[in-house]
């Protein structure tokens, strides 16, 4: 049986519990309960306060150095000779945008292939370019000469109101192709094959080769 003193103490515990409950609710509502943050280790093994903050001295994926973010090492010193076309290394090798050596034997437009330029004017072609005109009468000139292994810039202009597609017959040059809208000029930069000989080119639009749109690249 409870004594009078025990009965007198009961309301105090009830009041204390109610006050503690009120305090907890207040803290939760007011947002003063500290929320742990996701952290990432810093270079000294301690934790930084935000996983999305790059630690001092870190690099972003694809970054090569502080001055050329996202530029692969292989093409840092390469030169783009025609806007939109593939870059060329200091050693005279046509490269992909990832810095690998471009391949002439893949599908046109593939990531490994030399890339055709953006539409340009014929006057924008470098002076060292090989320039061809494509019309329903054929290519002019219908042949050109190059040295094996050299880098050449081949510019082709659709000199009439028709679409033309420049391609080579040889499968080893399948990637060297240019699609031209009427009146358009584009260029492609590629490494000439190492094998001497004659390499036939043509317009791949149905019926155009049959009417005379073809020619020869002579490798010396």
Image (tube, rainbow, N blue to C red):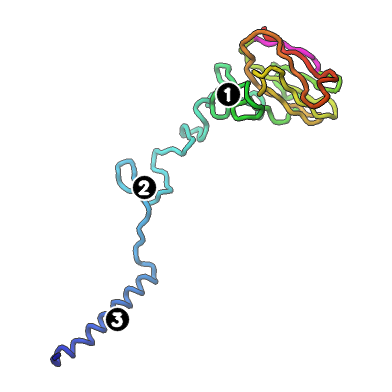
- Asked where in the image residue 113 lies, by quadrant, the reply is top right
What crowding class fits label 3: few (fewer than 14 Cα within 10 Å), some (14-19), or many (20 or more)? few
Which image quarter holds the N terminus? bottom left
| Marks 1,3: beta carbons within 8 A | no
Residues at circles 2 and 1 in contact by the CB criterion of under 8 Å: no
The answer to which of marks 3 and 2 sits earlier in the sequence is 3
10 Å crowding of disc 1: few (<14), some (14-19), many (20+):
many
Q: As displayed, is residue 214 above or below residue 112?
A: above
Q: Tell me the residue that label 1 is attached to.
A: 95
Tell me how far mark 3 sits from mark 2, CA to CA. 41 Å
Q: Quadrant of residue 127?
A: top right
Q: Position of residue 132 (x, y in %)?
A: 77, 19
| Quadrant of residue 78 within the rendered picture | top right
Provide the major secondary structure of the magenta segment: strand
Q: Is residue 162 above or below residue 55?
A: above
Q: Which residue is mark 2?
A: 40
* Closer to us: 171 or 33: 171
Q: CA distance from mark 2 to mark 1?
A: 38 Å
How far separated are the C-alphas under marks 1 and 3? 75 Å
x%, y% of residue 117? 68, 28
Q: Which span of residues is magenta-colored?
A: 139-147
């Amino acid at each position: 049986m409870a004594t009078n003193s025990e009965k007198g103490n009961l309301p105090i515990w009830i009041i204390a519990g109610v006050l503690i409950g009120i305090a907890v609710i207040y803290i939760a509502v007011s947002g003063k309960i500290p929320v742990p943050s996701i952290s990432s280790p810093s270079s000294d093994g301690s934790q930084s306060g935000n996983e999305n903050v790059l630690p001092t001295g870190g690099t972003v994926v694809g970054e090569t150095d502080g001055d050329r973010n996202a530029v692969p090492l292989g093409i840092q010193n390469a030169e783009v000779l025609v806007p939109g076309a593939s870059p060329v290394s200091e050693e005279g090798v046509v490269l992909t945008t990832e810095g690998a050596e471009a391949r002439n034997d893949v599908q046109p437009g593939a990531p490994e292939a030399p890339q055709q330029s953006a539409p340009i004017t014929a006057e924008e072609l470098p002076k060292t370019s090989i320039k061809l005109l494509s019309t329903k009468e054929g290519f002019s000139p219908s042949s050109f000469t190059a040295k094996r292994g050299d880098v050449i810039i081949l510019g082709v202009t659709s000199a009439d109101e028709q679409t033309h597609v420049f391609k080579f017959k040889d499968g080893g040059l399948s990637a060297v192709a240019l699609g031209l809208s009427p009146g358009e000029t584009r260029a492609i930069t590629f490494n000439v094959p190492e094998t001497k000989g004659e390499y036939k080119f043509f317009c791949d639009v149905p019926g155009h080769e049959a009417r005379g749109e073809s020619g020869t690249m002579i490798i010396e």
